[in-house]
């Protein structure tokens, strides 16, 4: 594949669009971008940890829903 003629697939484009929308939403809410310099490394890590914890909650909820629907072999209890 010639990189000069490369066109990302639809999935890549969808994810890129979602990142752009999320960045705009974050800017609208916090009036700041990820280039901000008012947080310490520890504060950035705290934000990341909180996001990761939320992610685990979402995964657990989805697994329970799929298990209840018998869509996957997910255990109902972890």
Image (spheres, grey):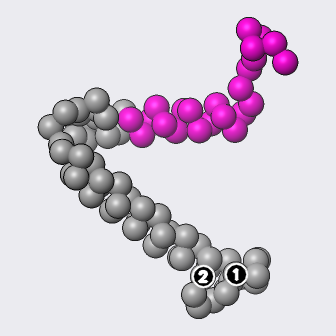
Label 1 environment density (alpha carbons within 10 Å; few <14, some 14–19, many ≥20): some
Instruction: Check the image and name the residue furthest to the top.
Output: 4
- In the foreground, 62 or 2: 2
Residue 74 numbered tag: 1
Per the model, the C-alpha gap separating discs 1 and 2 is 7 Å
Instruction: Check the image and name the residue furthest to the right.
Output: 1
The reply, left or right, for residue 67 in relation to residue 52 is right
Given this view, does label 1 or label 2 mark the residue nearer the observer?
Answer: 1
- In the foreground, 59 or 49: 49
Q: Residue at x 74, y 8 (%)?
A: 4
Q: Residue at x 67, y 77 (%)?
A: 66
Secondary structure state at the residue bearing disc 1: loop
Task: Give the residues drawn in magenta, as a range.
Answer: 1-23
Q: What is the x, y in percent for residue 12?
A: 66, 34
Q: Is residue 29 magenta?
A: no
Q: Residue at x 35, y 39 (%)?
A: 25
The reply, left or right, for residue 30 in relation to residue 71 is left
The residue that label 2 is drawn on is: 64
Compare marks 1 and 2 and give the one earlier in the sequence. Answer: 2
- In the foreground, 68 or 45: 45
Q: Residue at x 62, y 36 (%)?
A: 14
Residue 53 numbered tag: none
Secondary structure state at the residue bearing disc 2: helix
Is label 1 in contact with label 2 (beta carbons under 8 Å)?
yes
Label 2 environment density (alpha carbons within 10 Å; few <14, some 14–19, many ≥20): some
Q: What is the x, y in percent for residue 3?
A: 75, 14
Q: What is the x, y in percent for residue 30?
A: 22, 40
Quadrant where the N terminus sits is top right
Q: Based on the displayed image, in which of its 4 quarters is residue 60 positioned?
A: bottom right
Query: How many discs appear?
Result: 2
């Amino acid at each position: 594949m010639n990189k000069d003629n490369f066109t990302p697939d639809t999935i890549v484009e969808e994810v890129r669009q979602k990142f752009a929308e999320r960045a705009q939403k974050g800017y609208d809410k916090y009036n700041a971008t990820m280039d901000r310099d008012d947080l310490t490394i520890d504060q950035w890590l705290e934000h990341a940890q909180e996001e990761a914890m939320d992610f685990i909650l979402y995964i657990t909820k989805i697994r329970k829903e799929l298990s209840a629907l018998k869509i996957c072999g997910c255990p109902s209890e972890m």
